[in-house]
């Protein structure tokens, strides 16, 4: 799409919610690209990705995350939200210390976040992904597939 046409657009196809951790950027960028979303998604990058929606450290963390999602939806009317948590997330250290299975914890949180996002944004479908090691490379995989690993 030409830059001028891109500037004129008022909507996008998706919102991507991911962690701000530098170690996972290549894997995180690959998911929207493979889904055909190049230059067609908003981005929220926060420590812990969707943690603020399901296990917020503070009430203001939850409130600001919900406000940010709702604002982006109002101005760009996307219909998909791609939620990407990742293994080895330092924003989860306190929770992982008490959880028997880190992968299962992330998958559970992604599952809890989906209906919350869908309730915030009418007509939106939330899609859960986990960035994990697959054949020695970091890749975003659907949470259901990550659960079977």
Image (cartoon, helix red, strand yellow):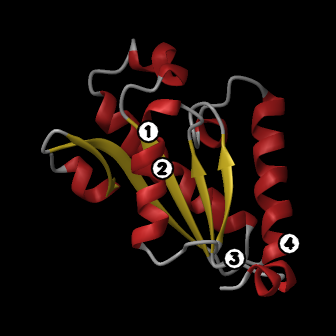
Judging depth in this view, the residue of 91 and 7 nearest the camera is: 7
Disc 1 target residue = 24
Quadrant housing the N terminus: bottom right
10 Å crowding of disc 4: few (<14), some (14-19), many (20+): few
Q: Quadrant of residue 60?
A: top right
Q: CA distance from mark 1 to mark 3?
A: 24 Å
Residue 79 in the image: state x and y as whole percent.
Answer: 64, 79
Q: Which mark is residue 84?
A: 2
Label 2 sits on a secondary structure element that is strand
Residue 139 in the image: state x and y as whole percent.
Answer: 30, 49
Residue 134 in the image: state x and y as whole percent.
Answer: 18, 45
> What residue appears at the point 47 percent right and 78 percent down from the top-left corner?
36
> What residue appears at the point 60 percent right and 52 percent down from the top-left corner?
17
Disc 3 target residue = 78
10 Å crowding of disc 3: few (<14), some (14-19), many (20+): many
Q: In the drawing, does residue 134 fall left or right of residue 92?
A: left
Residue 35 in the image: state x and y as whole percent.
Answer: 43, 74
Q: Earlier in the sequence, mark 1 or mark 3?
A: 1
Say above or below: 68 vs 24: below
Q: Earlier in the sequence, mark 1 or mark 4?
A: 1
Q: Which mark is residue 133?
A: none
Disc 4 target residue = 74
Q: CA distance from mark 1 to mark 4?
A: 28 Å
Circle 1 or circle 3, nearest the eye: 1
Label 1 sits on a secondary structure element that is helix
Q: CA distance from mark 1 to mark 2?
A: 10 Å
Circle 1 or circle 4, nearest the eye: 1
Q: Quadrant of residue 73?
A: bottom right
Q: CA distance from mark 2 to mark 3?
A: 17 Å
Q: CA distance from mark 3 to mark 4?
A: 9 Å
């Amino acid at each position: 799409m030409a830059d001028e046409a891109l500037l004129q657009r008022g909507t996008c196809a998706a919102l991507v919610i991911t962690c701000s951790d530098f170690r996972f950027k290549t894997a995180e960028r690959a998911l929207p690209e493979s889904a055909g979303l190049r230059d067609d998604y908003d981005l929220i990058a926060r420590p812990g990705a969707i943690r603020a929606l399901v296990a917020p450290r503070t009430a203001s963390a939850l409130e600001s995350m919900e406000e940010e999602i709702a604002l982006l939806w109002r101005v760009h009317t996307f219909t998909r939200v791609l939620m990407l948590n990742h293994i080895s997330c330092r924003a989860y250290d306190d929770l992982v210390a008490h959880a028997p299975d880190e992968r299962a914890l992330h998958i559970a949180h992604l599952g809890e976040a989906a209906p919350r996002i869908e309730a915030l944004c009418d007509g939106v479908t939330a899609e859960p992904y986990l960035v994990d090691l697959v054949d020695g490379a970091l890749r975003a995989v659907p949470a259901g597939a990550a659960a079977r690993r």
